[in-house]
Image: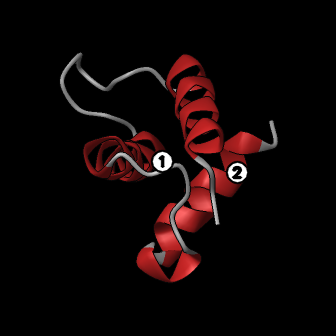
Amino acid sequence: MPSFTEVQTALIRCMEAEPSIDKISLSPDASQISTVFAVMQYARVDVLPNDKLTDKQLEAISRWVTK
């Protein structure tokens, strides 16, 4: 269950390491993480259960939250 802070941290780290492609498109990991970030922000939730996330989203978050 990733927390909002973990998702935010993962997104920041990912965006710093993998800047947007052609200044429009996000990297694949940043795209996955930003979707989760947006959902959490819109729903105003602090955590999301893992069963609400795709495997790709969970993998991207875990890759960047621990770096």
Q: Earlier in the sequence, mark 2 or mark 1?
A: 1
Specify the quadrant of the image occupied by residue 23: top left
Residue placed under numbered mark 1 in the picture? 29
User: What's the residue at 58%, 65% (across, down)?
Assistant: 58
Residue type, mark 2 in image = Arg
Of residues 60 and 38, which is closer to you in this image? 38
Q: Residue 9, how many percent across, how many down?
A: 63, 31
Callout 2: 10 Å neighbours few (<14), some, many (20+)? some
Instruction: Answer whether labels 2 and 1 touch (C-beta < 8 Å).
Output: yes
- Residue furthest bottom as drawn: 51
Secondary structure type for disc 2: helix
The residue at the point 43 percent across, 77 percent down is 52
Gap between marks 2 and 1, in whole Å? 9 Å
Vertical relation: 5 (above or below) 16: below
* Residue 54 drawn at (x, y percent): 44, 75
Name the disc covering residue 11, or none.
none
Residue drawn at point x = 65 percent, y = 42 percent: 6
Colour mode? secondary structure
Q: Which residue extends farthest left?
A: 24
**Badge 1 amino acid:** Asp
Residue under label 2, please give it: 63
66 is higher (above) or lower (below) than 57: above
The number of numbered badges drawn on the structure is 2
* Residue occupying image coordinates x 48% and y 63%: 57
Mark 1 lies on a secondary structure that is: helix
Looking at the image, residue 20 sits to the left or right of residue 4; the answer is: left
Location of residue 45 in the rendering, given as x and y in whole percent from the top left corner: 43, 51
| Label 1 crowd bin: few (<14), some (14–19), many (20+), radius 10 Å | many
Q: Position of residue 3 (x, y in %)?
A: 62, 50
Q: Quadrant of the N terminus?
A: bottom right
